Image (cartoon, rainbow, N blue to C red):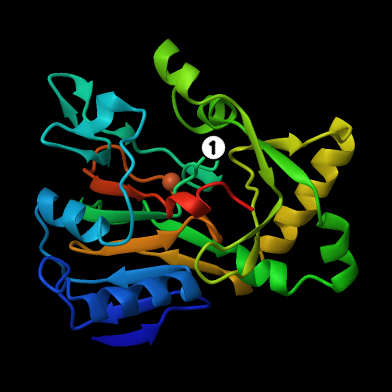
C-alpha cells in the first residue's frame, strides 16, 4: 500500500482493497496510521455491507448504534446515514441538512474510538464532511493555557445535539444515553497523544463551572481549534471509505440539495475494553 498526506492532516491510503487485504501486517500498519494521523481515506473501494463490517471489526468491537430504526436490516453494525425514504419513511439518519461539529459517541460512557463511513450514493455537490484535528490544536496551545485546562471535565449530551442537529430519541434510547462527563483533555488510547475532547454539537458545559464562564471557555477553545491549519474538508467521491479517530478529531457535514440522493453506511469502532473509559 501507498500513503499520501491529505491537506493539513489525514492520509490517503492507496493500493489496498479493504474487502481482501486483512493480513496482520497490513492491519497493524493501518492501526498506527489511523491513530497517528486521525483520518484515513481509501478511494475506489467496492464494498458489500459484510465487507464494511468485516474490515471495521479488524480494529475493535463494533457498536450497535442506539438508533435501531436506522440500522441496516441484515447488518445491525451498520448505521445508515441518508436522506432516502422507503414507503415514505426515512431509511437513514441526518437527512440533507447541515450537521454541526461533533465527535461520534462522545456522550457514551465508553465512547467509540473510530468511525468508518462508506459512500454508496452521493449528491453532485455539497454534503462534504469537514474534520478538525484536536490533537494538533491541543499541541499548539501555549503551555499556560494547557495548564489551565488540566483536570477539567466536560459534560456531553446526545439530547443537546439532537435538539439542534438531529431528531429526539425515543424513551428507551433516551434511557440508554444519559448525559455524561469526560476529561476535557484526553489521552489517546493507542498513540498516547493528548487532544481537546469537547465539541460545539454535543458538549453542554464544563462540570462545576458557572454557565457563562464555561460558555466563554468553550467558545474560546472552539475558535482556537477551528483555524484552517487544523482542518481538512472532504469532498466525497463514490466508493470512498473514510475512517476517522473519534478520540482526537471532530467532524461536521455540510448541507446538500434535498432532491439529490445521498446514501452512506457507517460502522462505529470501540476501543479495547481496558482503555474504554476516556482518561
Ligand atoms: Fe458524526
The structure residue drawn at horizontal position 27% and vertical position 73%, both measured from the top left corner, is: 27
* Above or below, comparing residue 41 to residue 76 in the picture: below
* Above or below, comparing residue 69 to residue 203 in the picture: above
The answer to whether 222 appears left or right of 130 in the picture is: right
- Mark 1, ligand 1, within 8 Å: the answer is no
The structure residue drawn at horizontal position 33% and vertical position 80%, both measured from the top left corner, is: 29
The answer to whether 89 appears left or right of 41 in the picture is: left
The structure residue drawn at horizontal position 32% and vertical position 56%, both measured from the top left corner, is: 116
Q: Which residue is mark 1?
A: 109
From this viewpoint, is residue 236 visible? Answer: no
The structure residue drawn at horizontal position 29% and vertical position 48%, both measured from the top left corner, is: 267
The answer to whether 186 appears left or right of 40 in the picture is: right
- Give coordinates of residue 108: x percent, y percent: 51, 36
Q: Quadrant of the N terminus?
A: bottom left
Instruction: Using the image as rendered, state which of residue 179 and residue 250 is in the foreground.
Output: 179
- Give coordinates of residue 268: x percent, y percent: 35, 47
Instruction: Using the image as rendered, state which of residue 235 and residue 61 is in the foreground.
Output: 61
**SS for dot 1:** loop
- Give coordinates of residue 66: x percent, y percent: 36, 28
* Above or below, comparing residue 213 to residue 250 in the picture: above
Instruction: Give the quadrant of residue 203.
Output: top right
Residue furthest out toward the top: 171
Instruction: Give the quadrant of residue 180.
Output: top right
Instruction: Using the image as rendered, state which of residue 160 and residue 75 is in the foreground.
Output: 75
The answer to whether 166 appears left or right of 72 in the picture is: right
- Give coordinates of residue 179: x percent, y percent: 61, 27
Instruction: Give the quadrant of residue 90.
Output: top left
Q: How many marks?
A: 1
From this viewpoint, is residue 7 visible? Answer: yes
Amino acid at each position: 500500500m501507498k500513503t499520501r498526506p491529505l491537506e493539513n492532516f489525514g492520509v490517503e491510503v492507496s493500493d489496498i482493497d479493504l474487502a481482501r487485504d486483512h493480513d496482520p501486517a497490513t492491519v497493524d500498519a493501518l492501526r498506527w496510521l489511523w491513530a497517528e494521523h486521525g483520518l484515513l481515506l481509501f478511494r475506489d473501494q467496492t464494498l458489500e455491507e459484510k465487507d464494511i463490517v468485516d474490515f471495521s471489526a479488524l480494529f475493535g468491537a463494533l457498536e450497535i448504534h442506539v438508533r435501531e430504526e436506522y440500522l441496516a436490516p441484515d447488518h445491525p453494525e451498520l448505521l445508515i446515514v441518508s436522506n432516502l425514504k422507503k414507503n415514505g419513511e426515512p431509511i437513514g439518519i441526518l437527512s440533507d441538512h447541515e450537521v454541526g461539529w461533533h465527535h461520534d459517541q462522545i456522550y457514551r460512557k465508553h465512547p467509540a474510538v473510530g468511525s468508518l463511513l462508506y459512500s454508496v450514493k452521493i449528491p453532485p455537490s455539497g454534503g462534504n464532511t469537514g474534520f478538525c484535528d484536536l490533537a494538533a490544536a491541543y499541541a499548539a496551545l501555549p503551555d499556560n493555557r494547557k495548564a489551565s485546562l488540566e483536570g477539567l471535565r466536560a459534560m456531553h449530551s446526545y439530547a443537546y445535539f439532537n435538539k439542534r442537529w438531529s431528531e429526539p430519541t425515543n424513551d428507551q434510547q433516551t434511557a440508554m444515553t444519559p448525559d455524561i462527563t469526560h476529561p476535557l483533555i484526553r489521552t489517546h488510547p493507542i498513540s498516547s497523544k493528548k487532544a481537546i475532547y469537547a465539541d460545539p454539537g454535543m458538549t453542554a458545559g464544563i462540570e462545576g463551572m458557572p454557565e457563562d464562564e464555561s460558555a466563554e471557555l468553550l467558545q474560546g477553545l472552539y475558535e482556537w481549534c477551528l483555524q484552517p491549519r487544523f482542518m481538512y474538508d472532504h469532498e466525497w467521491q463514490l466508493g470512498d471509505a473514510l475512517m476517522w479517530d473519534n478520540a482526537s478529531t471532530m467532524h461536521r457535514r455540510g448541507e446538500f440539495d434535498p432532491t439529490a440522493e445521498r446514501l452512506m453506511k457507517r460502522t462505529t469502532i470501540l476501543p479495547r475494553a481496558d482503555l474504554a473509559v476516556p482518561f
